Image (tube, rainbow, N blue to C red):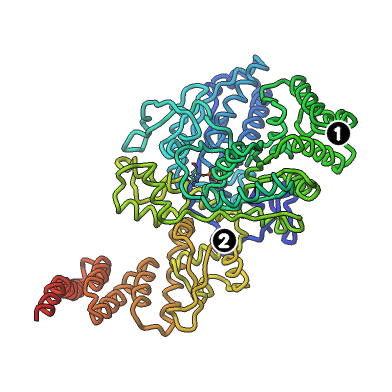
């Protein structure tokens, strides 16, 4: 039996696609089905409906509630939420599980606002309904049962985050959306909030901080782009070189900028767009959306609208008139009617229209773009095409393949996932370039951090460089947490970063992902043999190779474990987030197997012993960890690493039970000697130099 991760439907073992929702099915990964995840919980409840229901016939109650439930559910689902349950007339939905999209808190708040508006509209249409709502959104860590089937009413998430959401909900204004602190922090750049007084919640020692969500301040799937540009000189030079060839030699070119979320794709495209305009060209942007896209060609439709001066707010007939005028302006008379008709379909201006086949539609697009570019060199930017519908990707490739002798540069931006669904993207085109966007260098990262917040301490800067992976978005987020450090605990990762990295992990094929979680327990550096002990070892080389290919891990040329292939996580962040996903019991279990791996290996020296000690400790076996900590300490002492030894003895001491006086005394004595020696080493050095 395979349970669909998308809708909870059970499917027979041999099924490749879910027969309820059509999503591809993946065999359940072995081992744990529980994970600790950051989720955003949305609670929607009707105000005063119970009282009303008392006076109504049960059939009438259902006649009101059932369409209301459907409406709320479809709004929540359209933003990627999973409706977990209906409790009476309250509805609870989860964002960020079973799959994280990276912007889950923002989706949750947008969904909540959309629910509010949709129910208000329904009320206006049908005056008898008179439904009033209270909505809350709360974000936090929860234990998620990935095997749960919400469709069958099984609970998927458990944790304080759920209870707090329900408490907040009670304090929301009528027809308002209230959010907790984590949600506010993760979304305040995209949503306008007003402050409200903290909410006293039963069972909580402190009142819960809360804000009222008013409306989104940026379109879905975008961020505000501000501040100075750091680095990216070589990339801009390269793009400029391509542009000059395109504009002068009239050779169309497709460029795809590839990189993870937040690396700076949009920013680069924006800077380049300005350059193009300065050079006398024209630049138009279109974007694919992660959710609620209105048509398959949405990204292209945005560009055509810009080219024709059509606004979203224009009524259809105004839009059509503008389209017609523009097409008549640029195209030869013979094509005008047909091209206008076809583009109107693509733009959603003509909802009844249809075409016989796609080729015809694409042909009209080509005619239009050809005539536009004939007047002025043109840059078409397609953002976030990893979210694009297949039809749009086909359209882009077709344009790139068929346009001839025209100054058109098609610039597409995508996360590397694009290549999972379209491995041959760009292949076979006459002029295609892939431009992988590298992380900022340590110096650039530092420069960006200092631009965002003056007077950062060296310590903060070092930590930033360590965790941010040269990702400008992560740098901004980390700087923001440092700025607020007085209130937040600054050593835990900001929710936004954890969300984005989780989304990267969730996008992996299940077996690669589970391998990465296992490796995270071993450490930043890990060995093949350790993975064999933890997991099933099935097709291990292949999975390791795939992860290497994705640039998530690197294979080291040497190994500190004899005869063991050694690997390392490319980024500490990925390891950290992967590790945090594992529930405590699973972590302990895996730590024990890693410890066994170390014991079985022949390595007797240094780091291996200390690692062994720490794995036994984290496996929940302090009694097995203590002797190894002591042994590692003794080894360190022999190498005159006295302060290192002191650290190790200290770690041992923390594990010795208070009742074991003999062992306490023994370890304390060793610690004291090491400390004394560590203090005297500088003196001894001076003596030696003087002598
Ligand atoms: N080179 C850069 N210098 C300064 N800020 C940058 C740079 N690249 C990106 N940023 C900022 O980092 C954030 C994320 O960049 P963005 O272009 O939105 O990433 P992506 O489109 O790859 O997800 C934005 O706020 C952006 O302004
Ligand atoms: Mg972007």
Compared with 504, 682 (above or below) is below
CA neighbours of label 2 inside 10 A, class few (<14), some (14 to 19), many (20+): some
Considering every residue shown, the one lying at the far front of the view is 248
CA neighbours of label 1 inside 10 A, class few (<14), some (14 to 19), many (20+): some
Of residues 412 and 30, the one drawn nearer to the viewer in this rendering:
412
Specify whether 605 is left or right of 526: left
Specify whether 617 is left or right of 417: left
Residue 423: image quadrant is: bottom right
Alpha carbon of mark 1 to alpha carbon of mark 2: how far? 43 Å
Compared with 683, 412 (above or below) is above
Q: Secondary structure at mark 1?
A: loop
Residue 29 seen in this snapshot: yes
Circles 1 and 2, Cβ within 8 Å, touching? The answer is no
Of residues 10 and 230, the one drawn nearer to the viewer in this rendering:
230
In this view, the mark in front (1 or 2): 1
Q: Residue at x 29, y 49 (%)?
A: 457
| x and y, in percent, of residue 670 in the image | 18, 75
Q: Residue at x 65, y 24 (%)?
A: 64
Of residues 246 and 662, the one drawn nearer to the viewer in this rendering:
246
**Circle 2 is placed at which residue position?**
513
| x and y, in percent, of residue 495 in the image | 45, 46
Q: Secondary structure at mark 2?
A: helix
The answer to whether the beta carbon of the residue marked 1 is less than 8 Å from any atom of ligand 2 is no
| x and y, in percent, of residue 514 in the image | 56, 63
Compared with 366, 423 (above or below) is below
User: On residue 354, which mark appears?
Assistant: 1
Residue 481: image quadrant is: top left
């Amino acid at each position: 039996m395979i349970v669909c991760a998308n809708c909870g439907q059970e499917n027979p073992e041999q099924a490749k696609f879910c027969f309820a929702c059509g999503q591809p099915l993946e065999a359940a990964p072995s081992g744990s089905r529980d994970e600790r995840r950051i989720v955003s919980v949305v609670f929607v409840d009707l105000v005063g409906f119970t009282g009303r229901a008392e006076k109504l016939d049960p059939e009438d109650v259902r006649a009101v509630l059932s369409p209301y439930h459907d409406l709320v559910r479809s709004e929540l689902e359209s933003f990627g939420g999973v409706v977990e349950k209906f409790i009476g007339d309250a509805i609870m939905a989860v964002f960020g599980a079973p799959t994280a999209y990276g912007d889950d808190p923002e989706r949750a708040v947008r969904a909540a606002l959309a629910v509010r508006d949709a129910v208000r509209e329904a009320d206006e249409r049908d005056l008898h309904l008179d439904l009033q709502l209270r909505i809350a959104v709360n974000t936090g860590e929860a234990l998620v049962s990935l095997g749960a089937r919400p469709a069958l009413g099984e609970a998927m998430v458990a944790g304080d985050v759920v209870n707090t959401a329900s408490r907040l909900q009670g304090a929301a204004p009528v027809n308002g959306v209230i959010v907790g602190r984590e949600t506010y922090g993760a979304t305040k750049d995209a949503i306008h909030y007003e402050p409200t007084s903290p909410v006293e919640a039963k069972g909580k020692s402190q009142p819960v901080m809360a804000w009222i969500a008013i409306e989104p301040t940026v379109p879905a799937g975008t961020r505000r782009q501000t501040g100075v540009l750091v680095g990216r000189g070589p990339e801009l030079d390269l793009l400029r070189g391509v542009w000059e060839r395109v504009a002068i030699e009239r050779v169309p070119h497709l460029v795809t900028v590839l990189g993870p979320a937040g690396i700076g794709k949009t920013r680069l495209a924006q800077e380049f767009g300005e350059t193009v305009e300065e050079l006398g060209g024209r630049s138009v942007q279109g974007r694919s959306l992660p959710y609620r896209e209105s048509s398959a060609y949405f990204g292209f439709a945005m560009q055509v609208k810009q080219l024709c001066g059509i606004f979203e707010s224009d009524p259809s007939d105004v839009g059509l008139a503008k389209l017609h005028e523009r097409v008549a302006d640029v195209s030869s008379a013979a094509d005008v009617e047909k091209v206008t008709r076809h583009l109107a379909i693509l733009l959603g201006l003509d909802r009844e229209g249809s075409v016989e086949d796609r080729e015809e539609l694409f042909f009209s697009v080509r005619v239009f773009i050809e005539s536009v570019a004939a007047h002025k060199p043109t840059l078409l930017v397609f953002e976030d095409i990893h979210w694009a519908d297949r039809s749009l990707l086909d359209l882009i490739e077709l344009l790139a393949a068929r346009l001839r002798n025209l100054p058109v540069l098609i610039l597409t931006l995508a996360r590397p996932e694009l290549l999972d669904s379209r491995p041959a993207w760009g292949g076979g085109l006459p002029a295609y370039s892939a431009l992988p966007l590298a992380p900022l260098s340590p110096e650039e990262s530092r420069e960006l951090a200092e631009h965002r917040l003056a007077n950062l301490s060296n310590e903060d800067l070092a930590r930033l460089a360590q965790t941010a992976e040269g990702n400008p978005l992560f740098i901004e987020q980390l700087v923001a947490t440092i700025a607020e450090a007085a209130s937040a605990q600054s050593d835990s990762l900001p929710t936004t970063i954890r969300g984005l990295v989780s989304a990267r992990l969730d996008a992996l094929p299940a077996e690669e992902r589970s391998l990465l979680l296992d490796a995270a327990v071993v450490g930043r550096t890990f060995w093949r043999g350790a993975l064999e002990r933890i997991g099933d070892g099935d097709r291990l080389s292949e999975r390791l190779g795939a992860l290497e290919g994705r640039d998530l891990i690197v294979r080291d040329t040497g190994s500190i474990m004899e005869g063991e292939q050694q690997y390392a996580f490319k980024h500490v962040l990925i390891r950290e987030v992967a590790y945090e996903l594992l529930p405590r019991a699973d972590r302990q279990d895996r730590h024990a197997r890693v410890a066994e791996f170390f014991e079985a290996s022949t390595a007797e020296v240094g780091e291996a012993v200390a690692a062994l000690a720490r794995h036994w400790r984290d496996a929940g076996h302090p009694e097995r960890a203590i002797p190894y900590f002591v042994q590692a300490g003794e080894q360190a002492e022999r190498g005159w690493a006295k302060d290192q030894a002191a650290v190790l003895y200290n770690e041992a001491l923390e594990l010795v039970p208070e009742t074991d006086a003999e062992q306490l005394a023994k370890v304390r004595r060793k610690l004291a000697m090491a400390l004394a020696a560590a203090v005297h080493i500088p003196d001894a050095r001076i003596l030696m130099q003087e002598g």
